[in-house]
Amino acid sequence: MGLDVSYKGEQIARLSATGTATLKLAGKTCEGDILLSYSVGGISGGGISGGGISGGGASGSAAGSDVVFYDSYDHSVVASYSAAEFARLSALPANPEHAGLVAQGWNWTLENAKAYAAKYGRLTVGQMFVTDDGKTRIHIHLEPDRTTPVLGLCVNGSVSVDWGDGSEADTLTGTSTTTMKWTSRHSYPGGGDYVISLAVNGSIAFSGSNAGSCLLCHATTSDKRNKSYENDIKAIEIGNGLAKIGTYSFQHCYSLTHVTIPNGVGGIDNYAFQNCYSLPGITIPNGAVKIGDYAFQKASGLSYISLPTGITAIGNNAFEVCHRLNAVSCPEGVKTIGSNAFHNCFDLTNAVIPDTVTKIGGYAFAACYSLRKAVIPDSVTTMESYAFSDCIGLTELTVPGSIVTMPIYAFNGCNRVISTEIMDGASAIGNNAFSSCHNLEIVTVPASITSIGNNSFGSCQALAEFRILAQTPPTITTNTFNDTPDDLVIYVPKGTLEAYQAAANWTAHAAKMREMEE
């Protein structure tokens, strides 16, 4: 993606960076309009502006699009399409180019991407890169009083470590991608920007400890000064020989702005990018099978994530508190979405849950305030408590009958849901399942329901119609309909009115009951 800036027919700048940028026209006295012309995936256009010039983040560039292609190096949008436009494509967009990197292709094939977009209507695709010389490059910035780091890797074979300051390289050797090996302490000539290069003969893995990343540290043991070196890591471009991104690999690397991961890297382990606040997005390459527990927790700057077709599980707390994450396309093959997986993702508006998912963990989408629609496929047999609680932007909701027991607080506080239908097959609605859904007006409960829990529809202050299809009155409590309107109408199957009016705890609502028309 590029943005050309012209004044009176003369190109005065080209902007390609993501994020917010302000253009200052040094030496130019602009008495007329400034022309902005842009190109995104072969689509070009222009705009007129007479004031300041600023650009939004990567996710904003794709606003309203269904299928979006991201450059994982600079996080720009290479191309974006509506689902209908994408269905007509005969080829994927051209690979982006960057000096020092080889584009390996998109992490979805055209065939797979078309099938997924046609079925679910939404997809995020990312580009995979490997370095042109096969070496892994670690971009760092050292402060003048912090110039003596050690470097840690798990090595099966040998690694030559070029520190990027003209000094003699160090060598690490080992026999396992699970055992940490350390260089001796290196002394840089002063603060500044450096690029550490790793030439791998065999295989390596990044790793760390519960104290944080071990890639660049002050000491090989737990030391508070390690934190400052973690923050010195600015970017990672991965070359050949990486087996996996292990546990705690880049935890607390607060200044990390981009990571390019080549095709074939096996997975993202637990805590790998936890607290990487500055990371705007990432492409997970083909070959990865799982996003580990807490893998991106509190990566609060993350606006996009591209998951490949091979992913089978989203771990517990994997994307929790990723406030800027806008959309997630879980590929078919994902079976479990862990507890708290997307908890507190405030900007998440679109979340595709494919029909291979069997379990949605507790709080998985809780407090996703911008989530507008929840399509839960009937492959889901287990949904745990608070799964969608406090999704205050949710307006559409259908609950499949495959979820036999609706968990407690499942949709508590979903203030904007107007109607919901629970499909046949469900037998129990848990305590507070729909409590405080203040705008909920119409509820349909299937014939299979045998129990409705305490306060299940409590404080549903707009509830006007409650339709229940069960021939035998399910068990309820005295507070099932606590704080609902006095004019609520409860519709029961024809021929069952007397049974409902006489049933325990239903009696208090006898005057509100009506028989349905056949």
Image: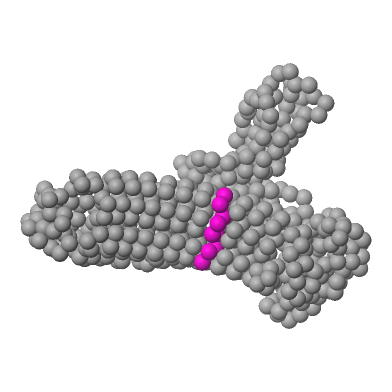
Residue 320 falls in image quadrant? bottom right
For the point 63% across and 71% down, which residue is it? 247
Question: Which of the two residues, 482 or 317, is positioned nearer the viewer here?
Answer: 482
> For the magenta stretch, what is the residue range?
316-324
Question: Which of the two residues, 453 or 494, is positioned nearer the viewer here?
Answer: 453
What is the x, y in percent for residue 336?
A: 45, 66
Q: Can see residue 265? A: no
Residue 133 falls in image quadrant? bottom right
**Residue 67, above or below 250:** above
Question: Which of the two residues, 184 or 308, is positioned nearer the viewer here?
Answer: 184
What is the x, y in percent for residue 190?
A: 90, 59
**Residue 56, above or below 405:** above
For the point 61% across and 48% down, which residue is it? 70
Q: Inspect the magenta stretch and tell me whether residue 317 lies in it.
A: yes
What is the x, y in percent for residue 236?
A: 73, 59
Q: Inspect the magenta stretch and tell me whether residue 436 lies in it.
A: no
Hey, which residue is sitting farthest bottom in the picture? 175
User: Along the horizontal axis of the image, is 404 left or right of 156?
Assistant: left
For the point 63% across and 27% down, which residue is it? 47
User: Along the horizontal axis of the image, is 112 left or right of 387?
Assistant: right
Query: Of helix, strand and loop, which mostly describes the magenta segment?
Result: loop
